[in-house]
Image: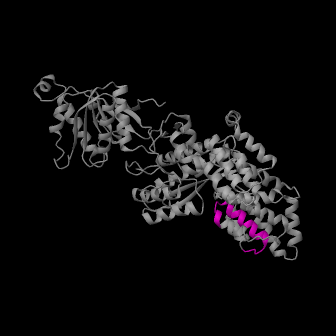
Amino acid sequence: MIFSIPNKFPLHLLLITIFVIYLPISVHAQSIDEGIEYYQQGDFEQALQIFNDIDTPQGRLFSGKSYYSLGQYLTAKTYLNQVSQEAEDEIYLEAEYTTALVDFQLGLYGDALNRLYELKDQSVKTQLVTNGRQLYNEILGYLTLDQRKSAFQQAKDPEIKYDLIEAAIGSVPLEDARTLYAQLVQSKIDTTSANMRELSETLSDSVNYATERRYGNQVKAPEGIVYDIGAALPSHSDSGSEFEVARGLHFGYVLAAEEFNQQQANKKAFIRHQNTAANMDSAGHAMTNLAWNYHADVVLGPLFSEPARKMAGLAEQYQIPLIAPLANSDTLNVDNPFVYQANPTFASHGRKMAEYAVQNMKMDTLAVFAEKNSLGEASAFAFRDKAEKLGAKVVHFFVEDLESEGYDLTDYTKFFTTDSAKIDKMKNHHQLDGIYAPFTGQAASTLAELLLVDMEAMGSDIPILGSQEWGNFNIPEIQLENQPVYFSESYYIDEKSERVEQFRKTFKKRFDTEPNRFAMIGYDVASYVLKTLNRIENSAYLKNALKTQPMYKGIISNINFKGSHINQEVKIFEISENGIRPVLKQD
């Protein structure tokens, strides 16, 4: 049973349909034949140009199947509902089966079961009926408790209600199972039936139920399930400053999905792109379209802060996890359980650097130096809090408006001396083990240069711990001879890695262009999400599962949320006269 591309007519049935039903209208027969050829080749958009002009049950059926394959579920259902019971049995049953697939993808599990229940009770057991029976049973074992409740309320036949409750036995706690049974009794089902008596006996014996639950069925997705991954990105046309970023991310998402589809025989993932541009209105429209038309399981994006805030609110309303691939704001996901950030925040960088300083470098006495109202300010506070929780002392904490002081740092750097005579003369001064200087923004390189000059003038060799920007500018080798410098970074490409080399070859072959760092970021984020979906099977668990997914070691980044909504995997590097090298080994 193929879920991503609904079952096509068996060849002999297809020929009968064409030559018997449409023989008097040879033009339509020729068109149907041509459209089906496009459909079988996977060219659904071209197929729709033909099927949408054929106002017959078979034309409506294949329009619906084509829209389904494109992930446009609501449109697919509109066409499929136009195939009435007056149509040929084979066509009508195929439409009902495909509509059940659509209902499943839309989360209308009760409606899907209603259709499949009628389908599986057909007297003639065709392959389509067999597929319907299989899908019916697979949906029963797939549902979460909340989804089961909704399906129970939608179920039309008492037998479906029974099947929904019976399928939950062993997979939910005993008290929950008894509550489900009570609801079944209240639905006026025949409690004297053998099945109901057996169910009642199972629930009355807590010891046997515990054994059954221990070996109960685990959640398993129906064969061929489609995961719809929303890509909320600006349109990557050849114009605009965001072109390389958006295109890189999108291509990375697509490559990850294609690799997932190759590796998984019974699951498929498709990237559903929606243009967000750079404003809140387009971002809101993109999120709504992904929720309503594609029933997206998760949305990756967007790029900009304002659209991200708009989409974050809608993510919570639609209860769709939103993963920002690049955003590193410390306020984006505040109190929003559906928003995740794959790029560690500035506070995350500060905490990780504090851990490295105290636990790895055994630093005990520290200073913090940052510019007020900069992004590095969040890093500074997070560093201090974490360092002190780990038992270290932050004896100097300077977060100052350095621009207003003309970037004269001497009033602060004088405390960073290693001259014991000067230390003895200064009040409240300490011998430092390290200085954390998370400079950010346009002034970052200037501040770093001034700090290094002052340190060199004082002959101080206290290690400097910095932000990402410290890795973006050249430091004279003479200054690095006696001045250890470390910085944190979210991304790192190991140029000697065979995996990186293979990724570049695959990417180049697929898209006829070299991958940039954003393509690697997109690939890593999408791969992480797909690995999580593959583990949990049912996307309803994704919101919480992302927090507990084991660390993903990617092409350019590692991802591990460690129970939070922000990626905690920050890398630490050392800058020396020999270049830049990673020093913090990832678990």
Q: Position of residue 587 (x, y in %)?
A: 49, 30
Pick the front one: 42 or 383: 383
User: Which residue occupies 75% across, 59% down?
Assistant: 157
Specify start and end residues of the magenta stretch as a single range: 53-74
In the rendered view, would you say 364 is above or below 350?
Answer: above
Q: Quadrant of residue 124?
A: bottom right
Q: 26 or 219, which lies in front?
A: 219
316 displayed left or right of 10: left
The reply, left or right, for residue 10 in relation to residue 43 is right
Residue 286: give x, y in percent of width and height.
51, 62
Q: Is residue 586 magenta?
A: no
- In this view, the residue in front, 24 or 577, is 24
Q: Specify whether residue 577 is in view.
A: no
The residue closer to the viewer here, 183 or 532, is: 183
Magenta-highlighted stretch: main secondary structure?
Answer: helix
Please give the name of the residue rendered at 68% of the width and 55% of the height, measured from the top-left corner: 152
Q: Residue furthest top?
A: 420
Q: How many marks?
A: 0
Provide residue 350's location: percent of width, then percent of height. Answer: 34, 38
Quarter of image, res 446: top left
Residue 532 left/right relative to 396: right
Q: Is residue 302 visible?
A: yes
Query: Is 54 colored magenta in this rendering?
Result: yes
